[in-house]
Image: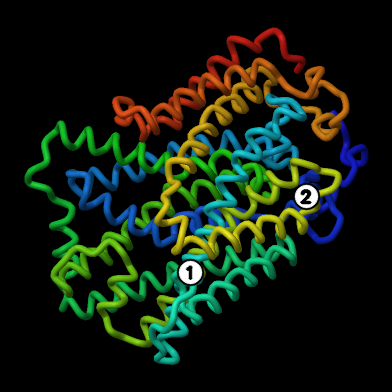
Amino acid sequence: MATIEEIPGAEMPHAGGGEDALAPVTGEAKSWGWFAIFNIWANDIQSLFGYSLVASLFISYGVSGWTAFAALICSGLLVMFLVNLSGAAGERYGIPYPVLARASKGTQGAKLPAVLRAIVAVFWYGVQVYFASTALALLIYSVTGLSGGAEVLGLTAVDWVSFFIVWAFHIVIFWRGMGWVETFLNIAGPFVYAVMIGLVIVLWQKSDGQLLAQARTIFTNPEATWGTEITGFIAIVGTMISYFAAVLLNFSDFSRYAKDRRAMLLGNLAGLPLNMILFSALALLTTAGAAVVYGEAIINPTEIVEKTDSVVLSIIAAVTFFAATVGINLVANFIPSVNGIANLAPKRISFRAAGMITSVFALVIGGLWTSFIAEFGISGFVNTLGATLAPVFGIMMADYYLLRKQELVRDELYDLEGGRYRYGNGWNNAAMIAFAVGAAFSVATVWVPFLAVLSGYAWLIGAGLGGAVYMALAKGNVAA
């Protein structure tokens, strides 16, 4: 195994101009403790969509609240198990997802899953920049009293100013390096929780103490049967696995900054099942409080804030939604985009250069979201790309744990011209075939109607299928 001194650029990447964005993280740069890992998941869960998703689970799946809670805890434990698998190599060797993929796909073949992940991430990065700008616009409207105005491409002048400010804010954070990303996540995660607790307190006061009673009614469902409870439980677990699938795949992008394995494991434990319990409880109480105060179960927190008709609460909510949306954008979209783009030409594209490329795409996608993209509807396209990534996880895990027994030669992962991970022409044919078979199934669940029933589990099945086919083809033919 190569030593640190033998690996070019083996110091902290992402510090600024010129350093290789994919260089292994070693030494003092591995500074993230369990709290930083915890906040990765806190920010991933705390988006507006995450809140609405969790709140809807208690209402829309035809199950009792206890079943929904059990399913959430189960899914948190399952994701924790899978993410500990995917993050182990990143923590041990300090390598990001695109570099880890080279071990199974080849130094050139790894570019395919990396760029697919980057495309999905770039698209949603741009969309989330737009959504974060709506929170800032809400803040401006609340403070100034402005409203409406002429629209250009579906946005008013205030909307456009907000959009460019948010877009520039992302650039400021990444330009300063991963240290600033860590700092922002560590602040945003606890802050959002503090505001959510505050909202529960406000609703508790407005409900004259009836909030808990309403929460108990949500936990009961007189029409539920054993059949609907089991079916709903499985559906919720599948939904939550799909929700976390993207970050689960490239978690080594973050685990490589962990101080040690213990920090990663504790961070994932607190960040997934325990974080899920806390967030779900707050979402349930907020939904229950809104049902008492406003007479309806509201799963969108922005609607709850609007109904309070409070300028102060609107300002606080705007800041909270902004922090939550930027947080998940950095975790789920920006880092995967940057690393995937840098992997296309590692010697020429630095972290900052990849970040600027991502930002330019975000400017176009986010700016056109309301006027063209949202109306045109390309969710099928994006979902298809996401589905193709399912077998990548299975192939990487089968390769790392079953074939290589968790042993990699790090310097050869960075040797793009030769070495064991080049597989002769840069492509591992066994991995490519397994990828095609697994992806064909996963994509079929998006487009073939009678397979739609499996869509919630397409990622897990696709991952298992990809790993199984890879093992059948590669065992005995891959140099460990």
Question: Real-space Cα distance between discs 1 and 2?
Answer: 35 Å
The residue nearer to you, when weighing 308 against 222, is 308
- Residue 108 located left or right of residue 182: right
Residue 469 vs 72, above or below: the answer is above
The residue that appears at 63% across and 57% down in the rendered structure is 361
Residue 342: image location, x then y, percent: 75, 46
Q: Is residue 320 visible?
A: no
Q: Quadrant of the N terminus?
A: top right
The residue that appears at 43% across and 25% down in the rendered structure is 461
The residue that appears at 52% across and 53% down in the rendered structure is 124
**Residue type, label 1:** Leu
**Residue type, label 2:** Ala
- The residue under label 1 is 153
Secondary structure beneath dot 1 equals: loop
State the mark number for residue 284.
none
Secondary structure beneath dot 2 equals: loop
- The residue under label 2 is 21
Residue 447: image location, x then y, percent: 38, 31
Residue 93: image location, x then y, percent: 75, 38
Q: Quadrant of the C terminus?
A: top right
Q: Which of pointers 1 and 2 lies earlier in the amino acid sequence?
A: 2
Q: Is residue 145 visible?
A: yes
